[in-house]
Every structure is written in C-alpha cells, then in structure tokens.
Image: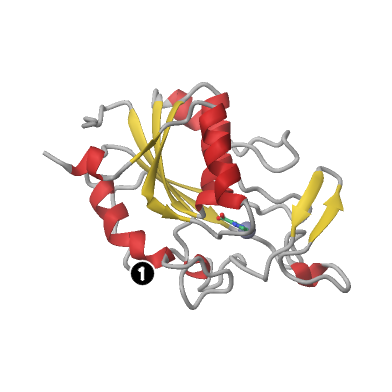
Amino acid sequence: MLILPHPTDALLVIDLQNDFCPGGALAVADGDAIVPLVNALGRRFDHVVLTQDWHPLRHISYATTHPNKRPYETIEVAYGTQTLWPEHCLQGSSGAAFHPALDLPHAELILRKGFRRDIDSYSAFVEDDHATATGLAGYLRERNLTRLFLCGLAYDFCVRYSAIDGKALGFETIVIEDACRPVNLPESVDATNAAFTTASVPRIRSTDLLTS
Ligand code: VGL
Ligand code: ZN
C-alpha cells in the first residue's frame, strides 16, 4: 500500500529520547535502531512534531517516589493503576535529551508531557487522569493538520496511548509499526495490537511511505 504524504499530514515522533535507548534508564530493546528510519520518514513530511517525556523530581511514575516499591510493579493512584518505572527522562537531564542521531531540523513543535509531579502522561494528547489536555489537539486543529502518522518509543505505552487518543479526538491516525519499538511487558504488545484493531487505527510499514 503506497501512501503519499499530504500537506495536512503530520509525523508525530514519540519520545525518541536517550533514556529509552540502549544504555538509558528505561531502555527499550533496539530503541536506537529506528532512528535512521525516523529520519528518512521525517523527510517525507512537511510537518513533524516531536514529543518529549519530561518528568520532574519525585515524579509519580518513579518507583523511587514510593516507599518499598520496585520498577515494573503497579500501584493504585487517584486516576487508576500506575506502572512504576526506573527514574527516567528527568527534566533537563541527558537521558531526557533526544537521541543524538535524530536529525529532524524542520520539526515544528516539541511537545513536552508528564511534567506534572502527580500525573503521568503516556499520551501526547491527554494525561493519564483522562482529563488534563496537553494542548496538542488544539495545536493540530488550529494548524489544520488532520492526518497523523506515529512512530517512536515505546510502541506499547506512549505510541499506543497517543494513537488511541488521537483517533478518539477525530484525527485520522496511522501507526508506522516498524518505526516503533516496545517496552514489552507481559501482554503489552498484544494488548496494544488489539486496542489498535478495536479503535480502527491502521498499522502500516515504513516502506508504504518510503517507496517511490
Ligand atoms: C514511556 C514509560 C514511561 C514511553 C514513558 O515513552 O512509552 N514509557 N514513560
Ligand atoms: Zn515517563
């Protein structure tokens, strides 16, 4: 399936940050392997938006914030179940910086998320309380960007929730599957694929955009 990018399309590059790459605090296997592909995809789009996971000290998602808790355990918080993570993407840290080989100088917006201490935000659109908007939907609407292609890290967390919310907010939303990598907790990839199917979020290959 060959897809021709349109002037009202945007490529959303989710959290391609050092902490999610090998050697980082919350490393995703082969997270860095997608960088050349994301750079090539970015050149196909007039409009590119980057997201950046951007947590304060003592963030609610850090296991270290909670006594006697370890990474990958879950706790109940005001908005539901929160998975606990190693400290990652601390505001201003080198781990929170974009991968140094990410080369998308024409990116028009860097959207930071997860900066409220008491609310995590996997989604680029709505924080995990399901109520606090990040402003991205308003930005895209004002700019008449109506179709979104998603890539980045991690497939089963921030790409998943960003794509589902984007679709629910009325954007045509497509995930470029081979330009993502998952954290891969038990069942997390299967659950993501099922959620995309239920929400009618198509998964495509990067070659669908890069050939010709
Ligand atoms: C992410 C876990 C914690 C992600 C962010 O970008 O997928 N995952 N914070
Ligand atoms: Zn995070």
Q: Give the image quarter of residue 59.
A: bottom right
Amino acid on which the number 1 mark rests in the picture? Pro
The residue closer to the viewer here, 161 or 193, is 193
Task: Look at the numbered disc 1 and give the secondary structure of its residue.
Answer: loop
Locate ligand 2 by image quadrant.
bottom right
Quick one: quadrant of the N terminus? Answer: top left
Coloring basis for residues:
secondary structure
Percent across and percent down for residue 191 are 60, 43
Quick one: quadrant of the C terminus? Answer: top left
Q: Mark 1 packing: few (<14 Cα in 10 Å), some, or many (20+)? A: few
The residue closer to the viewer here, 10 or 2, is 2
Q: Residue furthest left?
A: 212
Percent across and percent down for residue 33 are 35, 65
Which residue is depicted at the point 32% across and 26% down?
A: 8
Q: Give the image quarter of residue 2.
A: top left
Percent across and percent down for residue 71 are 72, 69
Work out whether residue 106 can be spotted: yes
Percent across and percent down for residue 161 are 58, 41
Cβ of disc 1 within 8 Å of ligand 1? no
Q: Is residue 9 left or right of residue 12?
A: left
Q: Is residue 12 left or right of residue 185?
A: left
Which residue is depicted at the point 88% across and 72% down?
A: 67
Q: Is residue 139 left or right of residue 71?
A: left
Which residue is depicted at the point 57% across and 25% down?
A: 168
Work out whether residue 136 can be spotted: no
* Residue annotated with mark 1: 100
- The total number of labels drawn is 1
The residue closer to the viewer here, 189 or 134, is 189
Which residue is depicted at the point 50% across and 50% down?
A: 155
